[in-house]
Image (cartoon, rainbow, N blue to C red):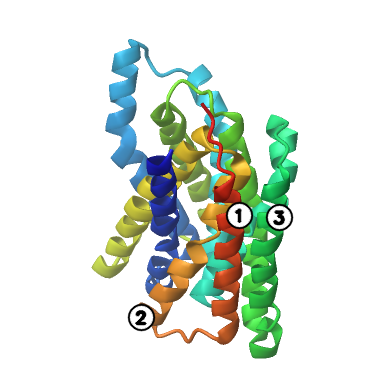
């Protein structure tokens, strides 16, 4: 149980790295979203083939079906996430897009009939108070930052649906049989949208290629895959609250790597989120 918890925290850290790559990249937002998904899908394909061989099965449409809706949802989430992240601070964008605990109970109930307990409610309330404190001053600093926060909020709703669907599919035959098709579907869906706005047939700088590879491997192959794995073993609300800690990692990296100034509200928010996570972890009861 403790090992799985540390794996989840590491997954949250891996996901938080995405905002650094996104801000450093100058490539079109839609192409960034699509390519990172293709990178993840191709990197993990050998594991999919390995599992198919073990099960002595061939990949079929029936096996693809559970990944279609989550894949399209993930594609939309990443598109809005890339756009919003470039319009506001790293800590803000990461925190807002991970406000999932606010609405996760609704989607968990709709998709899995999972109801959060009292300590999860208390931990969620404390963590979300940190979100409110962080976002309260944005409008006074920058109207563009506020727009970026709003787009990240839309991305957060899509992220919550994506995670709740992972919880619903927790009994799927194997993780790689679920997430690899999911990444392919998300990549194709994102690229289909991108074609309406940008021509992907062009030259790419080495720097942008490295950023996309980094996005595909660290926050997607490692981060998102761990989140999907954790949704199989922990209650959904716990995963969403631990994942909220992304903004702490992102804020620290934004300070050291991007020179972004962290105001007092960031530190207060971080303490509240950490406190909320502690309350939920205290009553930790993973799935058997």
Q: Is residue 220 visible?
A: no
Residues at marks 3 and 1, CA–CA distance in whole angstroms: 7 Å
Residues at marks 3 and 2, CA–CA distance in whole angstroms: 33 Å
Identify the residue position indicated by label 1 in the image.
279
Task: Please state if 82 lies on the left or on the right of 161 as rendered.
Answer: left
Contact flag, marks 3 and 1 (Cβ < 8 Å): yes
Contact flag, marks 2 and 1 (Cβ < 8 Å): no
Task: Please state if 37 lies on the left or on the right of 109 as rendered.
Answer: left
Q: Residues within 10 Å of mark 1 (few under 14, many from 20)?
A: some
195 and 53: which is toward the camera: 53
Which residue occupies 52% across, 73% down?
91
Tell me: residue 193, above or below residue 26: above
Which residue occupies 61% across, 36% down?
165
The answer to which image quadrant residue 144 occupies is: bottom right
Q: Residues within 10 Å of mark 2 (few under 14, many from 20)?
A: few
Report x, y in % for residue 285: 56, 37
Identify the residue position indicated by label 2 in the image.
256
Identify the residue position indicated by label 3 in the image.
122
């Amino acid at each position: 149980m403790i090992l799985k918890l540390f794996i989840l925290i590491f997954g949250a850290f891996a996901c938080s790295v995405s905002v650094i790559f996104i801000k450093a990249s100058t490539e079109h937002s839609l192409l960034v979203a699509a390519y990172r998904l293709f990178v993840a899908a191709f990197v993990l394909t050998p594991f999919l083939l390995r599992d198919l061989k073990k099960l002595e099965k061939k990949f079929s449409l029936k096996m693809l079906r559970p990944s279609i809706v989550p894949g399209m949802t993930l594609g939309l989430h990443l598109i809005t996430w890339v756009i919003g992240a470039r319009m506001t601070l790293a800590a803000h964008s990461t925190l807002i897009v991970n406000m999932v605990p606010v609405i996760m109970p609704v989607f968990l109930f709709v998709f899995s009939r999972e109801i959060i307990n009292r300590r999860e409610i208390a931990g969620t309330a404390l963590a979300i108070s940190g979100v409110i404190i962080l976002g309260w001053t944005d409008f006074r600093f920058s109207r563009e930052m506020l727009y970026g926060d709003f787009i990240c909020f839309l991305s957060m709703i899509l992220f919550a649906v994506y995670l709740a669907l992972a919880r619903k599919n927790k009994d799927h035959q194997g993780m790689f049989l679920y997430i690899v098709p999911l990444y392919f579907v998300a990549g194709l869906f994102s690229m289909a949208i991108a074609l309406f706005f940008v021509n992907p047939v062009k030259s790419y700088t080495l720097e942008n290629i490295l950023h996309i590879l980094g996005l595909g491997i660290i926050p997607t192959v490692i981060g998102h895959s761990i989140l999907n794995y954790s949704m199989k073993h922990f209650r959904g609300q716990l995963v969403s609250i631990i994942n909220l800690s992304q903004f702490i990692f992102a804020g620290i990296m934004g300070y050291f790597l991007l020179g972004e100034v962290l105001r007092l509200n960031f530190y207060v928010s971080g303490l509240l989120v950490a406190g909320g996570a502690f309350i939920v972890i205290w009553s930790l009861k993973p799935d058997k």
